[in-house]
Structure formats: structure tokens, C-alpha cells
Amino acid sequence: MKKTNMRRFPGVLLCLILAAATLLSFVACNGTGGGTGTATAPNGGTGNSGTNPDDPAGQKNNPETRPFSMSIQTPDGVFNPFFSTSAYDSTVVGQTQIGMLNTDSKGNIVCGENEPTVAKDYTVTETEENGKTYTVYEFLIKNGIRFSDGEPLTIKDVLFNLYVYLDPAYTGSATIYSTDIVGLSNYRLQKTGDINDDSAAAFEESFVTEANIRIQNLIDYVRLVGKGVKQEDKPSDTWTDAEKEAMKKDYATVAAAFLEELTKDYNAIDKESYKDWKFTEAWQIFLYNDGGRSELLKEDPARPGYPLKDADGNYQLNETEAKRIYDEEIQEYIDEHKDMSTEEAIKAFCILSVYDSYFPGNAITETNASNFESVVKYWQTASTVLDQFTAEAKSNYFASMTKLVPNISGITTRKTESFNGKELGEEYDVLTIKINDVDPKAIYNFSFTVSPMHYYSTNGWNGKDYIAAFNGVDEFGLEYGSIQFMNEVINAPSKVGLPVGAGPYKASNAKGSEEVSGDTFFNNNFIYYERNPYFETVGEGIQNAKIKYIRFKVVASDQIINALSNGDIDYGDPSATQENIATAENAGLGHVEILTSGYGYVGINPRFVPNITVRRAIMKAMDTALITQNYYKGGLAEIIYRPMSTTSWAYPKDAAVYKNAALGLDYSFDSTGSEIEDMLKAAGYEKVNGVYQKQIEGFGLDRLSGANYRLTIAGGSTDHPAYAMFLKAAEILNRVGFEVKVVTSQTALSDLSAGKLAIWAAAWSSTVDPDMYQIYHIDSQASSTSNWGYKQVKAGKATEAYSEEYNIIVELSALIDQGRSTTDQNERKEIYAQALDKVMELAVEMPTYQRKDMSCYNKNVLDESTMTPVSERSPYNGLLSRIWELNYR
């Protein structure tokens, strides 16, 4: 399974990573810097300072008062262990959590009294019953663990977490459901008897179909009552009054989602990306991109009606028209809204003016039918609404039926006083999970985080006390199959920003007071924690954190070393470049470079770039050598050729540039662009006004320009290993008949989790096992599949647009299933080599480099002997793998 966090997580965080969502993170992508000044002691701290066993006397810095400060790039703020998706969010959450199991420096599963795990011990046994093979996992649950609020962690919490992750309404990215647990399919589908993979897939697809029908009905209704449709083209009025009222509510849902999308788009604007177009203000960029105000571009006098380009192929701002729009439209809005700042008024005008052009007066009868259809088909709102309607269809189905299968038969519990051949001396709970056949990845899936039911469930939703109702038989602390319960209880707004768990630290605020909320936990670019006074209950070999207060400070990646030198932070992860290493050494900072369990890549989403030949052509424009020549110099990175970390035993050691003679494929860099242009012509693209385009059944007109062909650098600056490569690629592509632009984006994390980017450069982080289910399997519900356009591919499998992609994904998924059906490493290695070639054939992910991570710290402040020993450092074990043991000099 792959994740995407290029930080080396403390060991306590690994369990969160192993079972959490796909984490989309980026290398050398700058966040927005925030705040100044050194870390100061909080006022009014009320934590249990007596739990620190060390006497701070004689220390240069008092661990009871001085906060330890680390850098982080801008998180999304989804600090919920069940639903966090970005790497930075999961890093924040991870400080507060522990999991069932942990991993050591070699990636091996560990647990016990010296580990921050819920399990004290575990066993794995293969059995055979009636000619069928099963694997039985048993986990001995520790006694006496308490969450940071003092409440006990029990088998009830373990089961609650499992049943949340395995509930059919769960929409997070954890894929524990992909493990073939006995009885799981019966439970998720509420059907008895044998269930095969095809029937399960058809069951899930039925809700997508229902959602699409609901959307199409809404489109037709707007065509009936809205504007812009000739009378003879209007559909028949066949809906009941009740159905019309429901569609009016759906219209409002779409409108709200669209307004949210516009707001996010405005907030994500990076003016730096448009300076070569002479754009100077965010409103200009927004009105051009989202508002379609093409008059903001200068007209080419030689070609009236077409925009002017400079010698480098860049459009140019029409300053006269920009001034007119500001003076005649924006200024009027500013004058009418004196209660707003100028900046707020400009933003509001832009968003509302574009919104009103699609949803005038929020009136369905005034809405242009064509505009509305474009929103629910081609904007990001389309995906948002489809997901919501699909989830609602599933919830409605389960709510309307009698629950036939009360629990998952393969998940059971028992009491014992002996385990794994040892007498325990007291009674313990045992969790048993029985799976069909074998699955080498299962043990990692069972490393899930255990969060408190008393916090993430409720004692009062729709008149029911779900916590009190828990019985472990047919009640598990949640409403079965209810997306409403997931959204209103488990992922309630009050819980999204404030994590609670049994990890080494608990959420706090700047004052260290007991009154903590999401707003004070993450405030003014700082994220605050204090010592969990109950962490020592996790195991006999576990002590409470040595340093009482820690915090994250949002710092741009290219400012981390400056922040360390200035004393703003004590620890950070700058990009591992020769320049940064030299600067750190000159500043007297400590630093360590460790090979990353991950890799860089370029992603291309078929949702926006539908033609497989075009995607392959774009890959040929990428000169990956520039990454090691210009950015990661001196052996700090190497070029790779398959989408997997070279730290994995499954990476094909003889891999080279992907070529397949039988298919006529060769992804070698094309510096002239001549091969690229030949590929476009062979695929049926024709050049119109200098840009290639083609009408594609199942997609529409694919013109190789505009938003669908932006090359996005994740982060707010050009300090990125892929930036030079993207600039070179844009030059080549634009020369032969594309019209692409390289842009940077600070919201790339959330955009990727929503499948909103077309072409981008980023980096994955990989977990220990090379299983590819989460990222690439056709049945994966993880958000990462949105980046490969799986929803669109599956919906268009019978069309010209996506039939080839669908067949490749089916073949790829079969290989992934094969890789999970054996524990023979050599056999799995051969299978994954074939699967990786299929990914290359699909042309959605181009691997670029394998690099080293750099950890940098103030060695005059931190006691290096309390960091991870040199012998235990690895891609899976960074400097702060046991952060609770870290101390000052």
C-alpha cells in the first residue's frame, strides 16, 4: 500500500499511516509561512508535570516549560483519524494516537509492553476447514490503557474503530475493507450466502448508477423549467410534485457545492504563476479562469478574435480592459459594501459574480440549462455531488431494509488468562479476525489506529444513546450504513479540528489551558500540544513524554533552515539538497539524510486528459534527468522507472525506461517534440488555430489547452524538484501544438484528495508491503483512485474515451489480487513487476526519482542521545520515531 507523506513519522504515527487514507504530499513544496518569534512557554499550563521522571535541573532548557517546535507545511485542517487524507493532517493527528501494532526499523510488525500499541501480543495461524484455507489473527489487548482524557481504552473501542472502517457508508480512504474477512461481504451487502467479487462490485455500482440517474433527472428538469432551451427541445413534464420538490432541493445542493468550489479556487490562486502573463491581481486570474472573462487577454491584431502571445508563447493581460472591469464593476461593489475590507469585497464580488452567472438569484427558473449541465458534468462540483448522491443512495437503501446480518462473523472476541503459550496472571480480551485464504497485507491493515468511542460516537443522535447501546453483537457504537451519522457524529465539525486519542501528546492551545477547541488547537499557523499524562499506561516500557509542550509551526520548505537558525523552530525537514546541507553545516545545525520510503512522480488524470496516447505523449516530454542535475545533486536522488520506491523488495532492480515493442510504446524523452507530434496525429488529433484537438465519444471536445492541461507544482513556490522539468516539458509541448502552462498551487493537497488536478508533480510515500490495492485496484474506494479518473473510466467503459483504460485497469486489478493471494516473496515480486508495467501502460503515473530525506535540528537545544540511534534509523524509522523520549540538552 502506498501513502504520500515524505516526512519520517515517529513510530507512534506508523499505525495511523498503515491503516489511514491515501496521503497526498509533495516534496519541496512550500507552505505559507506564518508567525514570527521564538517558541515561548505557554501561560497557565495545567498538565500533570509530575509525570516527567527526569529532573530538569542543570538542563539548558526546561522541558516542563519550553515548547519543542517543529516545522510543518500548511495542513488542510481535517484532524480526524478516520477521515484525514493529507500527509500533514495525518502527521498532526498522529501525535495523539496509537495503533493496534507498530513497525520496527526494518518494517517488521512489532507490539508489546515497550511499544506504543494496543496489542500486547499477537499470533497468526493458518487453518483448513472443509477443504478451505483460512488465516486466523489473534490480538491480545493490553489492560489499563487510558486515553488522554483519562477514559479507559477497552475492547469496545477496538471494535468500534473496526466497524467504522468496515461500515458500507464509510467514505474515508482506509482500505481495511479490502481484506477478505470472513462474513465481511455479507455484512456490507446485508446478504446471506456466498458472495463473489462480481456481485459485490455490481452492488456498489448500483448506487453510482442511481446517483447518475438522479443527476440526469435534475439536468432534464432544469432543461424543462430553466432558460436557453427551445420549446421543442424541452423534455416532457413527467415528474410528480414530490419529485419536483426533491429536485429543487438537489438544485440547491449543487448550487452550494459550486459556491464552495469557487471559494476554494479563489483561495488557491498563486499570482506568481501568472506573472509571465502580466497578471498582477488574484481577481484578474479568477475572473479569467473561473469566470471565462477572455476580454482580460490582449487580442492578436493579426488574428482578430484570438488572444495575443508574446515570443515565449505567453498570453498578455489587457490592462485597459482590466482597469475597466475594476472601475466599473468591482469598485461599485466595494462602494456598496463599506462593512468589508477592500480585499474581502473584491473576493466576494468575484466569487458571487461568477456564481450568479450560473445560478442567477438561486432561481431554477432563471438558470441557463447549458450552464447548469456544465457544472454537474465538468466542474469539480460534478464529482462532489456524485459522491454525495451515491452515499445517500446507499444510506437510503440500508435505512429502508431489515438488517439481516447483524455483525461480521469473522470478527470475534473472547476472554483469556493465557496467550501464545504464556500464562498472563490476569484476564485479558482477545480480538480474533479470521480471513479467507491468505493475505500478506492483512497484518498491516490490522494495524489500525484505535480512537475513543466515547468521543467519536454519541450518546444522543436522533434520540438514541449509541455508546450505551453498544453490545458487541449487533450494536457497535454507530448507525449502520448511515452517511448522515458519519457526517454528523463521527466526522462532526467539532471533531474535525480536534483529535483525541491515547498517543504521547494531546491537543492543547497557546496557553496550555484545559479549554481547547479546534480553533485554538490550530491557530495563527501554530498547532499546539501538551503531554498526555496517561501515555505511560500504554505499556510497562513506556514513559510519559519528557518534553511537556510541543508545537508545529507552518513554515515554507525553503525557509526551514532560516527558521532553525533564527530559533523560530527546533526541528524541520527541508529538501535534501546540497545547498541546504551546506547552509545547515555553516549555521552549526545538526542534520541527517535517510533514504526515503517513497518516490517522486508526475500524475495525469484521464478525467481531464482522456486520450491514452496524449498522456503517453506528455510523459515523453518529461526530462527526468533535470531533477538530479538541477535539484537533487551529488547523489541525493536517483532516477527511477517504475512507480514504486526502490527501498521496496518488490521494485524491479533491472527496470529501465518503459518500452513495449508489442504495443509500440517507448517513453524515452523526446527533446525535439517530433515523436510527440507524430503520436498526436496518429491518434486522430487535428490542429485548429495552432492547437491540436479531437472530438471524443464519451468525453466531448478534447482541446490540448486550458485548465485540463495545466502542469501543477504542488506548493506556493517554484522551489520544487520537478519545476525545471515542467518548464522544459511546457516548452516542448507548446512548440508542437499544446497550449499548457506551469502553475503552483498551495491547495494541491486537498485538490488531489478530490481528484481535481489534471497534470501534477508530487511524491508518494510507501508502506512496508508493496500491495497496490489502495492506489490502483478497480474496487478501491480510496480517494487516490480519483486522481486516475476511475469513476469516469468505469462510467465510460463502453465509450471511445475510456474503453482501453477500463480493460487495462481490469487486468491490473487481477494482478493485484494475485499479489495478495500468496506469501511467496519471489512469486509476488514477479507479479508486481507485471502490475507496474500495466500502470505504465495506463499512462497515469510517471515515476521520476527516489530521494533521501533530510532532517535538520538545533543541536545546541536538543539532546542527540535521545533521538533514534544511528543503528535503528531507516526509511521506516526517522530521528523522532519515539518522540516521547526526546529531551533537551
Image (spheres, helix red, strand yellow):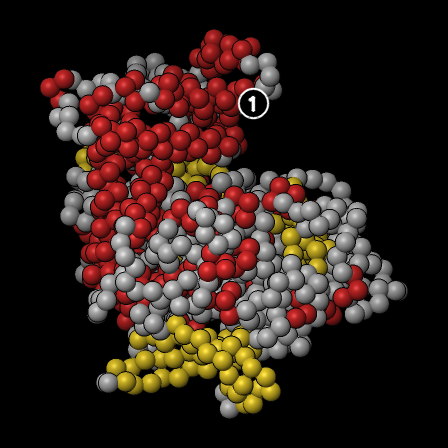
Residue depicted at 38% across the width and 48% down the height? 483
Q: Residues within 10 Å of mark 1 (few under 14, many from 20)?
A: few
Q: Residue 755: x, y in percent?
A: 38, 45
Q: Residue 408: x, y in percent?
A: 35, 68
Classify residue 639 as left or right of residue 331: left
Q: Total marks drawn?
A: 1
Front-lying residue, 123 or 722? 123
Identity of the amino acid at label 1? Glu
In the rendered image, which residue does mark 1 sit on?
344
Say if 765 sits above or below 823 in the image.
above
Front-lying residue, 195 or 106? 195
Q: Is residue 640 visible?
A: no
Classify residue 368 as left or right of residue 761: left
Residue depicted at 28% across the width and 19% down the height? 365
Which of the 4 image quadrants contains residue 738? Answer: top left
Q: Is residue 230 visible?
A: yes
Front-lying residue, 198 or 187? 187
Classify residue 866 as left or right of residue 341: right
Residue depicted at 72% across the width and 40% down the height? 36
Say if 194 sits above or below 370 in the image.
below
Classify residue 860 as left or right of residue 192: right
Q: Residue 882: x, y in percent?
A: 65, 67
Q: Residue 137: x, y in percent?
A: 42, 78
Front-lying residue, 593 or 76? 76
**Element at badge 1?**
helix
Q: Which quadrant of the rendered structure holds the C terminus?
A: bottom right
Q: Which quadrant of the rendered structure holds the N terminus?
A: bottom left
